């Protein structure tokens, strides 16, 4: 089992993801009957039926133009040419999903959906963006302590030698991380400063165990220190989880 580190980034106005994480974008419903008209739709084209009706020559031209592959059904969104999409419309079926884009609905509808008791899952605006956009945002954020890749990362295995070394050196906070992870105890920015003091003492304690051990645990210490610095400098809460 591994131990990961998290920060309470949405409580800080320095978090560039804060607004997106606070904004609900889509909800999943357990039953769509009442809100069917607001549900997202998927559209699928029956390629075999289209070829049989349009003829192989015309159908092949459409496939080449839109770089379509395979047989059977494909998602209509794969057809980029609008005139071809219109030609294939008779062979297109609609599938109602259980998802509703609440950003596209009026407030009274959103309120009714959110209080209906039918919402089983929620995706925020942050969940909806791609990894490239996430990376750009994290790369510019002061709270992105994991080498500008984000503010959540694995710290170490729960049986890491780091813990025993910390215990021997009297570094009670670091030695107690597994317990804090189990309880998900939340600490404030001031505690991050205390953690940094223990990390200063942890390095020489690890080095006493030999070069091989120091090299093995260097990543653990680096990640722990990076997270603690970000929280101490920006007064952000943090916690561990296993």
Image: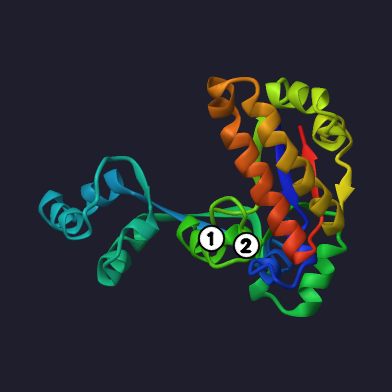
Q: Which residue lies under the disc numbered 2?
A: 126
Identify the residue at image location x=60%, y=66%.
141
Q: Quadrant of the C terminus?
A: top right
Whether residue 65 is visible: yes
Whether residue 160 is visible: no
Identify the residue at image location x=64%, y=20%.
209
Where in the figure is residue 111, as x and y percent of width and height?
83, 71
Q: Earlier in the sequence, mark 1 or mark 2?
A: 2
Q: Which structural element holds mark 2?
A: helix
Residue 102 position by quadrant: bottom right
Q: Nearer the viewer, residue 31 or 161?
A: 161
**Residue 134, which numbered label?**
1
Foreground mark, 1 or 2?
1
Q: Quadrant of the N terminus?
A: top right
Mark 1–mark 2 CB contact (< 8 Å):
yes
Q: Coloured how?
A: rainbow
Q: Nearer the viewer, residue 112 or 184?
A: 184
């Amino acid at each position: 089992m591994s131990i990961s580190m998290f920060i309470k980034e949405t409580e800080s106005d320095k978090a560039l993801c804060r607004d997106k994480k606070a904004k609900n974008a889509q909800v999943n419903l357990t039953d769509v009957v009442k809100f069917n008209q607001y549900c997202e739709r998927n559209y699928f084209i029956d390629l075999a039926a289209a070829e049989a009706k349009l003829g192989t020559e015309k159908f092949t031209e459409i496939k080449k133009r839109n770089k379509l592959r395979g047989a059977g059904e494909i998602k209509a969104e794969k057809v980029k040419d609008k005139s071809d999409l219109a030609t294939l419309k008779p062979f297109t079926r609609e599938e109602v999903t259980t998802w509703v884009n609440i950003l596209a609905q009026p407030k009274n509808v959103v309120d009714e959906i959110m209080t209906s008791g039918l919402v089983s899952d929620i995706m925020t605006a942050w969940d909806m963006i791609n990894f490239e956009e996430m990376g750009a945002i994290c790369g510019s954020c002061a709270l992105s302590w994991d080498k500008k890749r984000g503010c959540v990362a694995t710290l170490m295995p729960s049986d890491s030698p780091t813990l025993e070394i910390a215990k021997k050196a009297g570094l009670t906070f670091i030695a107690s991380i597994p317990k804090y992870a189990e309880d998900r105890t939340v600490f404030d920015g001031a505690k991050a400063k205390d953690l940094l003091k223990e990390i200063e003492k942890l390095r020489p304690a690890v080095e006493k165990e030999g070069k091989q051990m120091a090299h093995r645990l260097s990543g653990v210490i680096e990640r722990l220190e990076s997270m603690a610095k970000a929280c101490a400098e920006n007064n952000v809460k943090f916690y561990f989880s296993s």
